[in-house]
Image: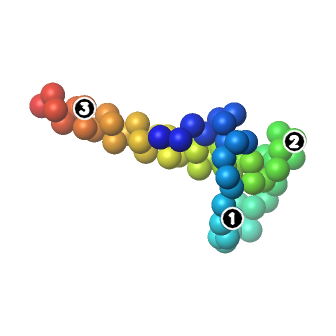
Amino acid sequence: MLEYNHKIKTMEMQTLIFRIPEEMNKELEKVAQKEDRAKAYIIRKAIGKFLHGVENAAKLKKCIGRRF
């Protein structure tokens, strides 16, 4: 699993293009401004947390499955 914290700065970046609803973009802009970060940074962190959660859920499911 990739670490989605400070090490992200050393990773080679890829470009993704996607669409989001206008309201979601407005909220993203508010968060980015409040945190004094780029929207891309906020999106990377959110995706990283999501992927980490998915991986942890899969590990937990595998672990629980072995016990029962």
* Residue occupying the point 25% across, 32% down: 63
Q: Colour scheme in the image?
A: rainbow
Q: Label 1, on which residue?
A: 15
Q: N-terminal of the two: label 1 or label 2? A: 1
The residue that label 3 is drawn on is 63
For label 3, the SS is helix
**Spatial distance from mark 3 to mark 2, Cα to Cα?**
40 Å
x and y percent of residue 9 in the render? 73, 42
What is the C-alpha distance between the residues marked 1 and 2? 22 Å
Residue at 62%, 46% in the rendered image: 46
Residue found at the far left of this picture: 68
Image side of residue 11 versus residue 62, left or right: right
Residue 17 point in image, percent of width and height: 67, 70
Q: CA distance from mark 3 to mark 1?
A: 35 Å
Callout 1 touching callout 2 (CB < 8 Å): no
Q: Residue at x 15, y 28 (%)?
A: 67
Residue, disc 2: 36
Q: Name the element at disc 2.
A: loop
Q: Is residue 67 left or right of residue 50?
A: left
* Crowding near the residue tagged with mark 3, few <14, some 14–19, many ≥20 C-alpha atoms within 10 Å: few
- Residue type at the position of mark 2: Asp
Circle 3: residue type: Cys
